[in-house]
Amino acid sequence: MSGIRIRKRKRLRQRDVKSLREELEAAVGNPVFGDDDNVDVAEAGDLGLIIVDNEIVGLVHGDKPFLSIKGVMKYGASKRHVTVDMGAVPFVTNGADIMGPGIVDCDPSIEEGDLVWIRDENHAVALAIGVALRPAAEIALKKGGKAVASLHNVGDRLWKVDD
């Protein structure tokens, strides 16, 4: 595990897997892992990790589970997306927070404090996972300042774990 220390890893019981799966599916709008998959939870710094069959596919921030970038790429996500213009992509992939003026679209159901995934406008590819600092109606106004605080981005230590 390159550059990240994973601690307190434990296997979830089947009923816990089911409730975690249902919570993730409600958040992202797509089916994720099955009841028969081996699902572990662990800690890495201030984030919790969701590990399915030895692959990190999700994270937990506070008490909210969400897919990691690799999880979004594996299972897809039809909800909680924030789309940025191509000019913002290099900053987002370097871990910068997402600023209001760089956002071109977002899921209208996003509430302040929700975990969201950031994608680019041309390819809709996942670039980062973050926490919405404003509800969707305010994000759509494209006002200056931070709209999403970045938690995990392409190229960070969590991204490089399984490489």
Image: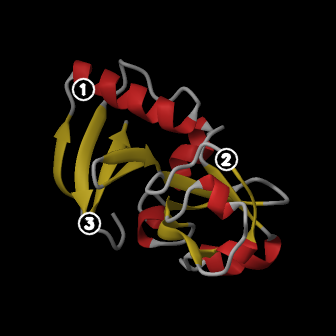
Q: Residues within 10 Å of mark 1 (few under 14, many from 20)?
A: few
Residue at image mark 3: 46
**Identity of the residue drawn at 34% across and 43% down:** 51
**Identity of the residue drawn at 49% across and 30% down:** 25
Q: Nearer the viewer, mark 1 or mark 2?
A: 2
Please state which amino acid type lies under the numbered disc 3.
Asp
Callouts 2 and 3 close, C-beta under 8 Å: no
Element type at mark 3: loop
Q: Is residue 9 above or below residue 148?
A: above
Q: Residues within 10 Å of mark 2 (few under 14, many from 20)?
A: some
N-terminal-most mark, 2 or 3? 3
Q: How crowded is mark 3: few (under 14 residues within 10 Å), some or many (20 or more)?
A: few
Q: Position of residue 93 (x, y in %)?
A: 62, 74
Please state which amino acid type lies under the numbered disc 1.
Asp
**Residue 43 visible in this rendered orientation of the protein:** yes
**Residue 54 visible in this rendered orientation of the protein:** no
N-terminal-most mark, 1 or 2? 1
| Name of the residue lying farthest toward the right | 122
Q: Is residue 130 left or right of residue 140?
A: left
Residue at image mark 2: 107
Element type at mark 1: helix
Q: Position of residue 108 (x, y in %)?
A: 67, 45
C-alpha separation, residue under disc 3 versus residue under disc 1: 22 Å
Image quarter in which the N terminus is found: bottom left
Residue at image mark 1: 16
